[in-house]
């Protein structure tokens, strides 16, 4: 985990190229004290890092985000109001890495959609 104690992985399943994961955000993490004081918001770059980390766990490799073809932030993630997130990541192996399609949500709210290419670096 790049950012210590940002989240706890509550559930993780990887079957037939699809990750289904649930995470719990740590509302007391220092990242939320600066982004933004009194109104914490999950930084988009942190969500991208979490997707990378879950993909690495699934494929058991160290990865580098080499390309994104689509990122849509569709709802604000406030760890005080919506600390539990569900992530669904479809992973397809390609030469030297993995293509992914992610959908992140809380409750019935779609928060983030992202398509990316991760290159193997280990």
Image (tube, helix red, strand yellow):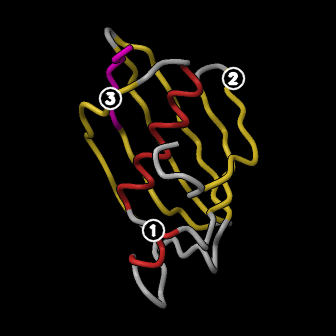
Q: Find residue 113 and report its horizontal and vertical position in percent.
A: 43, 51
Q: Measure the alpha-carbon separation of dots 3 and 1.
A: 22 Å
For residue 52, above or below residue 73: above
Q: Point out the residue furthest to the top here.
A: 95
Q: Measure the alpha-carbon separation of dots 1 and 2.
A: 32 Å
> Circle 3: is it few (<14), some (14-19), or many (20+) Cα within 10 Å?
some
Q: Main secondary structure of the magenta part?
A: strand
| Tag of residue 50 | none
* Picture quadrant of residue 89: top right
Q: Measure the alpha-carbon separation of dots 3 and 2.
A: 22 Å
Q: Point out the residue furthest to the bottom here.
A: 38
The magenta stretch spans which residues? Answer: 116-122
Nearer to us in this view, 58 or 105 = 58
Please give the residue where the numbered disc 3 appears in the rendered image. 64
Nearer to us in this view, 103 or 33 = 33
First in residue order: circle 3 vs circle 1:
1
Q: Point out the residue furthest to the right here.
A: 11
SS at mark 1 in the image: helix
Give the mark toward the camera: 3 or 1.
1
Contact check, label 1 and label 2, Cβ < 8 Å: no
First in residue order: circle 1 vs circle 2:
2
Give the mark toward the camera: 3 or 2.
3
Q: Find residue 92 and report its horizontal and vertical position in percent.
A: 46, 20
Please give the residue where the numbered disc 1 appears in the rendered image. 31
Q: Find residue 11 and report its horizontal and vertical position in percent.
A: 75, 43
Residue displayed at 67% across by 43% down = 21
Please give the residue where the numbered disc 2 appears in the rendered image. 15
SS at mark 2 in the image: strand
């Amino acid at each position: 985990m790049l950012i210590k104690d940002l989240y706890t992985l509550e559930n993780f399943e990887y079957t037939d190229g699809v990750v289904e994961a649930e995470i719990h955000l740590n509302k007391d993490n220092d990242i939320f004290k600066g982004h933004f004081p009194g109104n914490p918001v999950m930084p988009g770059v942190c969500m991208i890092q979490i997707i990378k980390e879950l993909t690495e766990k699934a494929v058991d490799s160290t990865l580098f985000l080499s390309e994104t073809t689509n990122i849509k932030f569709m709802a604000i993630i406030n760890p005080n109001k919506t600390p539990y997130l569900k992530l669904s990541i479809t992973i397809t192996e390609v030469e030297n890495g993995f293509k992914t399609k992610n959908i992140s949500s809380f409750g019935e709210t779609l928060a983030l959609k992202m398509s990316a290419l991760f290159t193997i670096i280990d």
